[in-house]
């Protein structure tokens, strides 16, 4: 028997679509980041998560009920640990990895997280490791590697081992965060605003300790605003809802669309050059998505109506 009843299936599909929206927004991250490349990374982290936190508070305030609406930020200590650990932990490890190893190698390792989501989701109550999800995730991973290895040499070197371990930590942290969210399905997505605020505070502390503040230009300020509202703001709220109520294995497979979409947008903006590798990557990621979803579609078609 399926762990999802017919009554909850539309809600599950809607939650999964929210995750797809988050993935699409993450696809714009690289292009938007080019507008703030002159700013220190922890300053960008603190600024964008502060904007995301304000966005979350605005969502809560829009519902009214005064200060009582802030009760939506309540969650158990373990929820705070997971939220802040996932958001800040991933980004801190990623920035360190980029400082200790070449970006292409860091991305290759860090983008194991969608495959890990597929594998880890099998451990959830009612979870099951389906071959179509694993096959789809492997096709998506092949597509991402096709794009990221376009620069040539991606061989691993012992001197970069700390960076590789940090990138692997990124994959483990984000996949664990995404799957463990299921334990907090009753916590509203509004609570992400609190995790974003805590992440912004930690980022600010790191920035003040390790970096020199750079006053953003008007263009950089707009870039920070766009990042904070989109790939950092709306995307994380949507992902929170999706991982708590959507189809996690499918979300894992579809997540491989983000880096490919990112490359496509960079090409359209003239920041990167289109190539046969990019086309091959798009085909592989699309094939992975089709493989992962085809089985569920056929199963629904075969299920007798009541």
Image (spheres, rainbow, N blue to C red):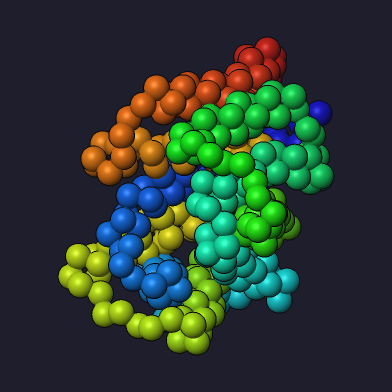
Q: Is residue 5 left or right of residue 146?
A: right
Q: Quadrant where the C terminus lies? A: top right
Looking at the image, which is closer to me, 1 or 126? 126
In which quadrant of the rendered image does the N terminus lie? top right
Residue at horizontal 45%, vertical 38%? 151
The outermost residue toward the left is 218
> Image quarter for residue 189?
bottom right
Residue 170 image position (x, y, % from top left):
63, 57
Report the side of 251 relative to 120 (left or right). left
At a point 60% along the width and 33% down the height, the residue shown is 141
- In this view, the residue in front, 18 or 273, is 273
Residue 165 at x, y = what percent? Answer: 69, 57
Find residue 139 and report its image quarter: top right
- Disc tally is 0
Q: Position of residue 111 (x, y in %)?
A: 59, 45
Using the image, determine if residue 286 lies above or below residue 177: above
Give residue 129's quadrant in the image.
Answer: top right
In the image, is residue 281 above or below residue 299? below
Rendering coords of residue 256 (x, y %): 53, 37
Position of residue 166 relative to residue 239, above or below, is below
- Residue at coordinates 50% horizontally, 71% vertically from top-left? 196
Residue in the picture at 46% in, 22% down: 280
Q: Examine the rendering and report whether any part of residue 96 can be seen.
A: yes
Image check: 252 left or right of 236?
right
- For residue 169, say whether it is visible: no
């Amino acid at each position: 028997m399926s762990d999802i009843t017919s009554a909850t299936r539309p809600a599950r599909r809607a939650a999964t679509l929210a995750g797809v929206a988050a993935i699409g927004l993450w696809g714009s991250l690289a292009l938007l980041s080019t507008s703030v490349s002159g700013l220190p990374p922890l300053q960008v982290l603190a600024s964008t998560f502060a904007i995301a936190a304000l966005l979350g508070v605005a969502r809560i305030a829009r519902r009214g009920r005064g200060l009582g609406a802030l009760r939506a930020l309540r969650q158990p200590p373990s929820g705070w640990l997971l939220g802040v650990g996932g958001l800040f932990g991933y980004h801190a490890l990623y920035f360190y990895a980029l400082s200790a190893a070449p970006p292409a190698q860091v991305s290759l390792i860090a983008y194991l997280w969608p495959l890990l989501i597929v594998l880890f989701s099998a451990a959830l109550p009612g979870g099951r490791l389906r071959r179509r999800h694993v096959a789809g995730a492997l096709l998506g991973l092949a597509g991402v590697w096709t794009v990221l290895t376009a620069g040539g040499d991606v061989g691993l070197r012992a001197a970069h081992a700390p960076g590789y371990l940090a990138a692997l930590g990124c994959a483990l942290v984000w996949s664990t965060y995404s799957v463990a969210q299921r334990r907090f399905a009753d916590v509203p997505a509004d609570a992400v605003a609190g995790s974003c605020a805590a992440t912004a505070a930690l980022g600010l502390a790191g920035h003040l300790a390790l970096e020199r503040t750079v006053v953003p230009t008007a263009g950089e300020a707009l870039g920070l605003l766009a990042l904070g509202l989109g790939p950092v703001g709306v995307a994380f709220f949507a992902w929170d809802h999706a991982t708590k109520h959507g189809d996690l294995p499918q979300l894992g497979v579809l997540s491989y669309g983000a880096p490919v979409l990112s490359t496509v947008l960079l090409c359209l903006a003239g920041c990167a050059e289109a190539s046969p590798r990019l086309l091959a990557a798009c085909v592989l990621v699309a094939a992975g998505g089709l493989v992962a979803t085809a089985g569920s579609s056929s199963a629904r078609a075969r299920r007798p109506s009541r």
